[in-house]
Image: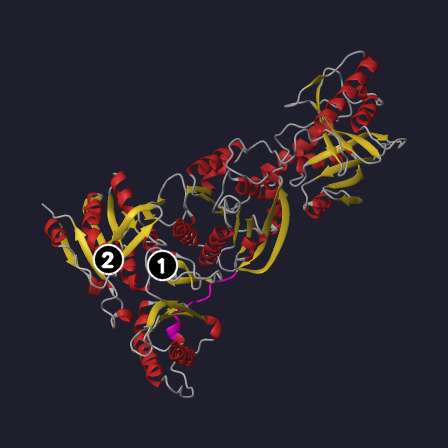
Amino acid sequence: MNAKPRLTDYWVTCADGLETLLQQELENLGIQNIQRFAGRLIFKGTLENAYRVCMWSRLASRVLLPIHTHELEFTHDARDVAEELYEGAISFDWSLVFAPQSTFAVRLHVEREIKVNTQFATLRVKDGVVDSFMEAVGKRPSIDIKQPEITLYVLAGKTEHTYCLDLSGDSLHKRGYRHFMTDAPIKENLAAAILQKAQLQQLQPDLILDPMCGSGTFIIESLMILTDRAPGLVRRFGFNGWHGHDRELWLSLKAEAAERHTKTLEQPLPKFYAYDADWEAVKATRQNIIAAGFEKILDQIQIEERTLADWDDFHAEGKKAFIVTNPPYGERLGDKASSRSFYLGLSGLLQKNFPNQPVAVIAAQIEQADVLAITEPQTLRLMNGKLPIYIRFGTVKPAAVVQPFLATWQPQQFEKIEGAEDFTNRLQKNMQALKKWAVKENIFCLRLYDADLPDFNIAVDLYGDRLHVQEYAPPKTIDPEKAKKRFNLGLAAIRAVTGLNRDAIFIKTRAKQTGTNQYEKQSTASKRFIVQEGKAKILVNLTDYLDTGLFLDHRQIRLRIAKEARGKHFLNLYSYTSTASLHAALGGAASTTSVDLSNTYLNWSKENFVLNGLTVDHADEQHMFFSSDCFEWLKEGHEQYDLIFIDPPTFSNSKKFYGTFDVQRDHVSLLKRAMNRLTSDGTLYFSNNYRGFELDEEIEAIYQVEEITSETIGLDFKRNQKIHRAWKIQHNQI
């Protein structure tokens, strides 16, 4: 008759937030009567139960066997915790647990509110264990902090100290495959928890994508789950030197795990895609997959250096896909606005490529996760080391079919606005004239009215489904009250004609600017919106500055640059928010370089780039941004560019730049310096909006010059041909 296996209490620790998922996992391993505490589960079970947790748990941190409890007697107020721990350690015969030939280490954990020097207290526990051995067998074991044969886990409590044998040895999240690391990787057991929460096994997807794979943890943990590979199959444990270790039992469990894995490997697997913008990460992923024992199935894993904007065609239609990723943005990108743009960009790509497919995305702040377009979102908060992370689960919302505002706009029926009849008629007429063109060309941002009538000296610009209304400051000869009344009539007419509510209309007064005034903040309301232009999504700010971040009159030249940029090195001087660079990048430019004095605008530029899935501040230097005076920057460098765009201000001065810039006076030297940086068969586009500007004859004598103003002015600016002038300049071909 077989004896019934002895039941013992075991502790299983985990990261904060994993307790419920870990309990489910233990129950699936056949363990019952589980007690749940913060960061720890306790169950009464057999040694086989404990071994199975060591072998199969994907979520646990440690499996502990409580050996000894030292109860405390409170006879004094001032506690000497270190001495209590020593007394507890020496009061037990540790030679019953392991031999003096074994090396050991102590890991001390202290409950909250207990004040003690943990380093010193750990030493006192070690002293107590060693002194216990000397008393019992006259021999002392050696200490090995790095790779001990025996690890003792000690919990210092308020009423008792508990001394445990750590059966796991090192933390169970260390599977042994991660030979190569990238910055801020997610722990293996947290990655597994996310996959478990996402129900990867039940999904049985046809393809799995991690677009920012880092060191490949999600890909490897997915492989381990789908091939029924036990995480403890090839790693060291902390029970080998323990007197109570049942070697035969452990070897039988190991053989069972190996057989299960081999059998499951015969089943078909999904196609895996592991992308990263960093070549080092791509290399690390490949090497870690091999280290994890999956070299034979590398042909099913597409591991490539790719930015978000450079995704392949996954042919996902009609297939089940699963997307999981840990973006490297958040804390490291700096401000919340930038990281928000990044997550918006990622969300847009998911909507485009994987509508109605399940996804799990990690965020450093909950605000980042909130911008993801996910149906019925769920959030799991975990601790990755000392940092909280938020994982957003759900199904990707299909992208809404967006069309220009004018596509659905129809002339409105409204009561006559007395005093603004001419303005009303003109605005309505303009919108009708622009409607067909805007729809055909898919134009979302355009000028609807530009001071066409002397009495209504305003500009009305459409940005998506919002209006930006600029009132040009009236001459001093005009009565301010009369001007105000007329402007209010104009606003009433704008609302009536467009059908837009007051909250969709943003108003500014534009006086003549001097010096740096044009760059000064006008407001702190920060109404930022995303608009579409060609392939680009662009951030505009309709409140804070006089200019919105997007010069509408240069739309045609930006779209021209997008068409011409493929494979070229592009330079953008006086880049402002670098929308021309963005178009070049999305058009397939080999590189883009943007130069502007303003850090505010360069940060805005970077946001535009990450919003479109493009990588900035990367080692490959594909997209570069320089805060510098353009004159000085041109003088100092030697790099050559195939395509250059220059749209300088009419006049400027700056604290960063000695002297002033005047476009009429200084354009010859500016263009000469820029042409020195243009390849022999390259093209430079030069534009400015100074009404009286004349291109110097010297430029026309030295280079091949063609004025292209009419080609760069869209239908919405045809009423104002002096909005800017533009030239195409090339080197003379010999």
Q: CA distance from mark 2 to mark 1?
A: 19 Å
| Camera-side residue of 105 and 180 | 105
Q: In the image, is residue 520 above or below residue 38?
A: below
- Secondary structure found at label 1: helix
| Camera-side residue of 369 and 572 | 572
Mark 1 is surrounded, within 10 Å at the Cα level, by few (under 14), some (14 to 19) or many (20 or more) other residues, namely some
x, y percent for residue 363:
55, 49
Residue 637 shows up from this direction? no
Asked if residue 196 lies left or right of residue 550, the reply is right
Amino acid at circle 1: Gln
| Camera-side residue of 591 and 18 | 591
Q: Residue at x 42, y 67 (%)?
A: 402
x, y percent for residue 669:
19, 47
Does the stretch in magenta take in 664? no
Residue 402 shows up from this direction? yes
Whichever of labels 2 and 1 marks the residue nearer the N terminus, that label is: 1
| Camera-side residue of 232 and 498 | 498
The numbered dot on residue 687 is 2
Of circles 2 and 1, which is in front? 1
Q: Residue at x 22, y 48 (%)?
A: 670
Q: In the image, is residue 426 above or below residue 387?
A: below
* Quadrant of the image containing the N terminus: top right
x, y percent for residue 323:
52, 51
Q: Indicate the quadrant where residue 33 lies.
A: top right
**Mark 1 lies on residue:** 518
Q: Indicate the quadrant where residue 38 lies.
A: top right
Amino acid at circle 2: Ser
* Quadrant of the image containing the C terminus: top left
x, y percent for residue 2:
85, 32
Q: Main secondary structure of the magenta part?
A: loop
Highlighted magenta segment, given as a residue range: 397-407
